[in-house]
């Protein structure tokens, strides 16, 4: 029984609780000093004993800052010392708000007023309680040591036969030492008992309630769902408009050539003219087929049903394949040279067919936007033990700063007339990003006007 009672003096948690209680002394001494300095001139003004100083508003701000400092320190100590899970002081709000909006949010936040109430309760209750604990500790420790030492000295003097020594002095001092030690034990137990109550008070007052937190989370989720629904709805409308726009030109071309062939059925046509018309029809049909394939790919990615055959793929071999397929065509038609730099066999985890399609899209895009006689480079590099980068760069005019964030959008063209001339629909980069993301990688672009562009595909090394 005695061991259990005395165990409080050897436990680390006891002194942690004592330190937490005594923390109120420096915190609230500063707060009370500022508050007292403030309310002194205000009291004189209210009782018409003197004018209100001009610096009173500054003291009001200083007092508010001091109270806020107490709240912040209380939360930090409760969280770090005791691992207390605290709700935030306020729900998440937009970062860029006007000062008026921030002030309104501060006033309407219930935690603001609960924090003020907490500060005043602590000043009226916590501060005096900390003083009592400090007095109890001082009396217990100093009294126990002093009286115990006096009792021991009295016993020694009595044993040595010293004259004029009260024989009952040792007994009285020993009883006083026991009493002081009892006061010390009571003080330690009171500090341990009060700390959980204090922590519960902190959790209740210095954070939004769980109900409000859940409500704000539900409202945020509803707002996010609404925003996603609006984006999806806008995307669907844009898709319909863009697809209709893209279909109009090839269909109009096909219709015109078909009508020309039909109107000239009774008119003798040369074989060369017929072949020219048929080549146009074939080209426009291929364009429509390509658009349908690209839209199906995007639709599969949107619904999470993009088929992938993930395996260990040699990225260097894929880069070589794309180079061998595109280099002769680029050199013959645009006098653009394509080079391939690689580090030997570098394996990544990817879908080989999709990776080839991504690089083909990037190389075609680079060729399209590189002037004749320019250069396109395909590079495969190992960043570290787990990351491989496959980059496609060109010596074209680059991308304007305001367009860098838009080039991966569907149907976006940085050069409208040139893209149409080359048969593009503005879907290549969007499809590339969806495929790379589905393979667990990422794609980024580095470019500036007049400095060329560099698209980098990052994949996990196999």
Image: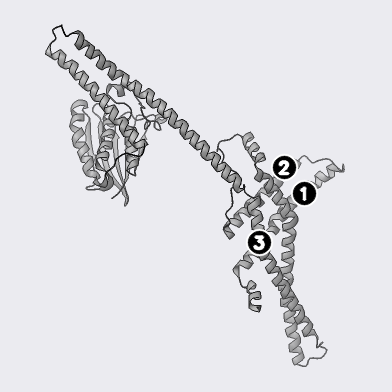
Separation of marks 3 and 1 at Cα, in angstroms: 30 Å
- Name the disc covering residue 112, or none: none
What is the secondary structure assignment of the residue under circle 2?
helix
Check disc 1 and report the residue beneath it. Answer: 37
Q: Earlier in the sequence, mark 2 or mark 3?
A: 2
Q: Earlier in the sequence, mark 1 or mark 2?
A: 1
Seen from this angle, which residue lies furthest top? 267
Note whether residue 445 is visible: no
**Element on which disc 1 rests:** helix
Q: Is residue 162 visible?
A: yes
In the figure, 360 relative to 237: above or below? below
Residue 27, placed above or below residue 156: above
Horizontal and vertical percent for residue 327?
20, 33
State which tag comes first along the sequence, 3 or 1: 1
Q: Is residue 114 above or below residue 396?
A: below
Name the residue carrying label 3. 195
Numbered circle sitting on residue 58: 2
Going 29% across and 27% down the picture, which residue do you hit? 291
Residue at far bottom of view: 161
Q: Residue at x 81, y 40 (%)?
A: 52
């Amino acid at each position: 029984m005695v061991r259990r009672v005395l165990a409080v003096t050897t436990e680390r948690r006891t002194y942690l609780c004592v330190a937490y209680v005594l923390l109120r002394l420096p915190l609230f001494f500063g707060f009370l000093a500022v508050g007292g300095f403030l309310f002194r001139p205000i009291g004189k003004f209210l009782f018409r004993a003197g004018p209100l100083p001009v610096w009173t508003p500054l003291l009001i701000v200083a007092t508010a800052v001091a109270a806020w400092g107490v709240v912040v320190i209380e939360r930090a100590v409760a969280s770090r010392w005791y691992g207390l899970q605290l709700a935030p002081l306020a729900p998440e709000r937009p970062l860029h708000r006007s000062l008026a909006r921030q002030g309104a949010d501060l006033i309407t936040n219930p935690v603001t007023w609960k924090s003020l109430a907490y500060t005043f309760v602590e000043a009226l209750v916590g501060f005096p309680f900390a003083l009592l604990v400090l007095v109890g500790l001082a009396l217990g420790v100093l009294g126990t040591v002093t009286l115990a030492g006096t009792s021991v000295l009295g016993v020694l003097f009595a044993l040595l036969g010293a004259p004029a020594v009260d024989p009952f002095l040792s007994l009285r001092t020993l009883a006083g030492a026991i009493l002081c030690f009892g006061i010390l034990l009571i003080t330690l137990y009171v500090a341990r008992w009060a700390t959980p109550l204090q922590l519960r008070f902190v959790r209740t007052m210095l954070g939004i309630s769980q109900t409000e937190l859940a409500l704000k989370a539900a409202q945020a989720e509803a707002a996010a769902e609404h925003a996603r629904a609006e984006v999806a709805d806008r995307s669907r409308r844009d898709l319909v408009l863009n697809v209709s726009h893209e279909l109009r030109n090839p269909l109009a071309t096909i219709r015109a050539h078909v009508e020309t062939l039909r109107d000239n059925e009774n008119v003798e046509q040369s074989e060369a003219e017929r072949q020219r018309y048929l080549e146009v029809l074939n080209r426009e049909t291929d364009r429509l087929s390509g658009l349908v394939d690209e839209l199906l790919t995007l639709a599969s990615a949107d619904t999470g049903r993009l088929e992938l055959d993930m395996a260990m793929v040699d990225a260097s071999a894929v880069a070589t394949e794309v180079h061998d397929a595109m280099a002769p065509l680029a050199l013959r038609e645009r006098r653009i040279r394509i080079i391939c730099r690689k580090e030997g066999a570098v394996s990544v985890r990817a879908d080989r067919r999709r990776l080839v399609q991504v690089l083909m899209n990037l190389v075609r895009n680079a060729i399209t936007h590189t002037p004749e006689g320019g250069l396109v480079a395909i590079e495969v590099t190992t960043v570290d033990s787990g990351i491989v980068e496959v980059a496609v760069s060109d010596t074209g005019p680059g991308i304007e700063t305001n367009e860098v964030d838009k080039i991966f959008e569907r149907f976006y063209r940085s050069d409208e007339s040139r893209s149409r001339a080359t048969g593009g629909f503005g879907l290549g980069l969007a499809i590339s990003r969806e495929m790379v993301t589905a393979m667990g990688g990422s794609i980024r672009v580095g470019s500036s006007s007049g400095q060329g562009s560099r698209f980098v595909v990052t994949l996990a090394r196999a």
